[in-house]
Amino acid sequence: MKSLAALLKASHFGPTLIVTMISALLSLYLGMGAQTPLVAFGVFTGQLLVGWSNDLIDFQDDLNHQRANKPLVSGDLDLSLLRRWMIWMLPISFLANLAGPLGIKGGLTHMLGILFGVAYNFYFKFSPLSPLAYAIAFAALPASIAIGAGISPPLWLALGGSIFGVSAHFVNVLKDMKEDRASGIGGLPQRLGIKGSIIAALICLIAGLIFLVATFEPVS
């Protein structure tokens, strides 16, 4: 039971749950009805992979900065156990998404977003192109649900998700900005610094709201 709780914590359970719930609400809005729990399950498995890969790649850095709230650092979770769960979860996530309500096309679109989420942890977070991973991942998720619902993804949905995703990226790094820069993590937010990242996040947020107001059309 302790290991299960640690695994959930290592998945960054709060954001994982929020993304899963938003996806479920979007699924209901797009008329997927009784299929929504299966959509949510597929999204949840993908978010587990993103969160776990983050803690896996960050383990040494978390250890260096004594982040005792991380299960791998505190010893509540064994590194080999986390790797095994990631290996098991990968085919489960593919099956849940490609064989589920999203269908092959929607499932592959969703897994593309998960791929970029994982790629962010291993590569993009060290690159000035770091917002690109968030932009693609946050566009792919709502687009995949729209495809699963049998509609062409509306521009406001995919591009709006992308813009808000980039804004979330700049906000997400603020709490660890000092430690990240000390560790040589050179994503765009770390290069801009705290003030620059806050400004960038606000610009993206305002731009996203203006874009949604200008382009939103109810899905029938």
Image (tube, rainbow, N blue to C red):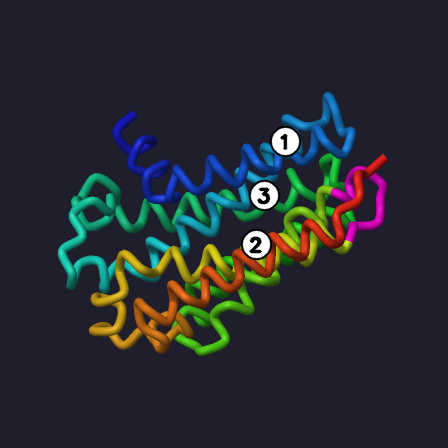
Q: Earlier in the sequence, mark 1 or mark 3?
A: 1
Location of mark 3 (residue): 93
Location of mark 1 (residue): 25
Q: Which numbered disc covers residue 114? A: 2
The rendered magenta stretch, by its main secondary structure, is classed as loop
Left or right of 187: which side holds 148?
right
Q: Which residues are magenta?
A: 146-154
Q: Earlier in the sequence, mark 2 or mark 3?
A: 3
Q: Do the residues bearing badges 2 and 3 touch, measured as CB atoms within 8 Å?
A: yes
Please tell me whether mark 1 sits on a helix, a strand or a loop. Answer: helix
x and y percentages locating residue 138 in the rendered image: 59, 54
For the residue marked with disc 2, what is the amino acid? Answer: Ile
Residue 176 magenta-drawn? no
x and y percentages locating residue 57 in the rendered image: 34, 61
Left or right of 104: which side holds 26?
left
For the residue marked with disc 3, what is the amino acid? Answer: Ser
- Of 129 and 189, which appears nearest the observer? 189
Q: Residue at x 39, y 57 (%)?
A: 171
x and y percentages locating residue 20 in the rendered image: 54, 36
* Alpha carbons under labels 2 and 1: distance apart: 19 Å
Q: Earlier in the sequence, mark 2 or mark 1?
A: 1
Q: Residue at x 63, y 26 (%)?
A: 37
- Of 80 and 109, which appears nearest the observer? 109
Specify the quadrant that holds the C terminus. Answer: top right
Left or right of 165: which side holds 182?
left
x and y percentages locating residue 118 in the rendered image: 49, 59
Q: Residue at x 71, y 42 (%)?
A: 145
Q: Is residue 99 above or below residue 205?
A: above
For the residue marked with disc 1, what is the amino acid? Answer: Leu
